[in-house]
Image (spheres, grey):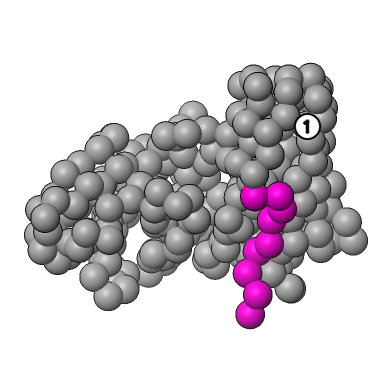
Amino acid sequence: EAGVAQSPRYKIIEKRQSVAFWCNPISGHATLYWYQQILGQGPKLLIQFQNNGVVDDSQLPKDRFSAERLKGVDSTLKIQPAKLEDSAVYLCASSVGGWNTEAFFGQGTRLTVV
Amino acid sequence: AQKITQTQPGMFVQEKEAVTLDCTYDTSDPSYGLFWYKQPSSGEMIFLIYQGSYDQQNATEGRYSLNFQKARKSANLVISASQLGDSAMYFCAMREGGDYKLSFGAGTTVTVRA
């Protein structure tokens, strides 16, 4: 089966610009996660969707970050305006749901804000 | 509060030897899953092994085994017969039954020496 698809793979923008990331989860996976991973650290959960509803967005900086999941399938994560500290890898993951199933990850988008 | 704690930032291991990576977790939910992921320098997140809170036996997957001590809330990963390709960052993660939130530790970098 196809894996989790993310695009773009790399993005360089200037501070105060906006950027959007796209994720297509594995077909049939109800749960979708967006993580921010700063170099050398563990992934930090930004937002979790169950189908097209938000389960957890407590760590999403809502003044600049937004996310949506279209019809419970694809998802986009947007940053507007970007700050230097947003430089990180943004990982998308999906799972069928349930606490006993693994999450599958995309290859991530490496964002550099200059 | 930190859900997952990995106290070893980095470890060196000789090729063909075994290495144990520590992970402790914190939850009051009786239903939870513990996962280990490998992240090589290329960046992809690779699922290695899973242990469920109700599992009576320790999980094993090839050269990977999980030393699950429920009373101590620890889930240490053992990699036997280390190979050069095992050099990577390793993350312990937990998903709780209530909301399926998947939380990660800070990771441990493993370097295998020839």
Above-or-below relation of A40 to A61: below
Above-or-below relation of B18 to A109: below
Above-or-below relation of B26 to A74: above
Given residues B74 and A74, the one toward you in this image is: A74
Given residues A33 and A9, the one toward you in this image is: A9
> What residue is rendered at 16% in x and 44% in y?
B12
Instruction: For residue B112, say whether it is visible.
Output: yes
> What residue is rendered at 27% in x and 61% in y?
B85
Estimate the x, y position of residue B54 in percent, counting from the top left: 41, 66
Based on the picture, tell me whether residue B14 belongs to the magenta stretch.
no
- The quarter of the picture where the N terminus of chain A appears is bottom right
Q: Quadrant of residue B62?
A: bottom left
> What residue is rendered at 57% in x and 63% in y?
A104
Kind of residue indicated by mark 1: Ile
Instruction: For residue A44, say whether it is visible.
Output: no
Label 1 neighbourhood size at 10 Å, few (<14), some (14-19), many (20+)?
A: many
The region drawn magenta spans A1-9
Please give the residue where the numbered disc 1 appears in the rendered image: A79
Q: Main secondary structure of the magenta part?
A: loop
- The quarter of the picture where the C terminus of chain A appears is top right
For residue B40, side relative to residue B17 (left or right): right
Above-or-below relation of B42 to B107: below
Estimate the x, y position of residue B31 in percent, counting from the top left: 51, 58
Estimate the x, y position of residue A42 in percent, counting from the top left: 46, 39
